[in-house]
Image: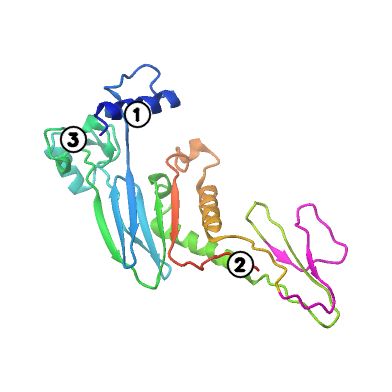
Amino acid sequence: MLLSDAGKKELAKYAAKGGGANGALNMDELPYQAGCTATVGVITKTEVYVANSGDTRAVIASKGKAKDMSHDHKPDNPPEKRRVERAGGFVEDGRVQGIIGISRAIGDWEYKNPKLKPEDNMVTVVPEVIVETIRPDHDFLIIACDGIWDCLTSQQAVDFVYEQKKKMAGRKSMMVTGSSSGSSTAVSAAGSGSKAMSGGIAKKGATSPTKRPSVTVKPGASPTKSPVKKLAAAPDCLSRIVEMMMDKICPTNLAASEGLGADNMTCMIIDFKKDAVASFGE
């Protein structure tokens, strides 16, 4: 597709938008310079299918344990290295031809030979597919680029998600009930971020510019609905966990980290539990 006229024109549009070509590459050269890794997860009622080409990784979590659903396709992995060499290439410093640090990818036609079968090329597009039968104890699936895995192991990433989900689920305990004994009860929420929430009993007359207005149940009242509003929806909470993961591994000193934690930082969390950190309130 990339080698077709339509594909070359599309690549030229992207190159012009980002200023990447700067006139140095013509349309015929672009397919040889453009490429990306890809991991695709397909979830059915009974199985999880993961197809991976490159060093993006998928990890499934169950009972606190991480299980890799893909293999990182690095050129110095023995099976990958053998294919590279059979196709007439070599691996130097963990890179195909001493240049590219992955052995499978979409595009990158500089390392592909149209005369070979797709699966026989130095940098093949053909993915590896792993299938896992869904069990009740499966909790979530993480799909992330190599930038995440340069900083965290699969188990560390899973531990982090579990920890944050537990904290967020704990906030569901912020419920307000009216009292018929003449006392007044209120709840307020505040946080350092738009989705970070904390609750407590509001003191009489206390105000804070960082807190949302308190909701008070008048003495003797018996409301039919809880005064607590919806605090967060599951997708928002999962997005927030991804943000916190990025914050955790983002370096404060690029020179000291040698660039780790600042490149290819893409992550997605797919939760199998519909009610885990679900929306709550009314």
Residue at image x 63%, y 67%?
Answer: 171
Residue contact at pointers 2 and 3, CB within 8 angstroms: no
Over which residues does the magenta segment extend?
198-224
Tag 2 secondary structure: loop
Residue picked out by circle 3: 90
Amino acid type indicated by mark 3: Phe
Q: Quadrant of residue 111?
A: top left
Q: Say which quadrant the C terminus sits in.
A: bottom right
Q: Is residue 32 above or below residue 41?
A: above
Q: Which residue is mark 1?
A: 10
Find disc 2 in the rendering and name its residue. 280
Residue 70 pos. (x, y %): 30, 54
Name which residue type carries label 2: Phe
**Is residue 210 within the magenta segment?**
yes
**Side of 201 where 156 appears, left or right:** left
- Mark 2 or mark 1: which comes first in sequence? 1
Q: How is the image coloured?
A: rainbow
Contact? badges 1 and 3 (CB < 8 Å): no
Look at the numbered disc 1 and give the secondary structure of its residue.
helix
How many badges with numbers are in the image?
3
Is residue 207 rendered to the left or right of residue 267?
Answer: right
Task: Tell me which corner region of the image, top left, top right, bottom left or bottom right, holds residue 99.
Answer: top left
Label 1 vs 3, first from the N-terminus: 1
The residue under the point 24% across, 31% down is: 109
Question: What's under tag 1, amino acid-wise?
Answer: Glu
Real-space CA distance between mark 2 and mark 3, rounded to the nearest whole angstrom = 56 Å
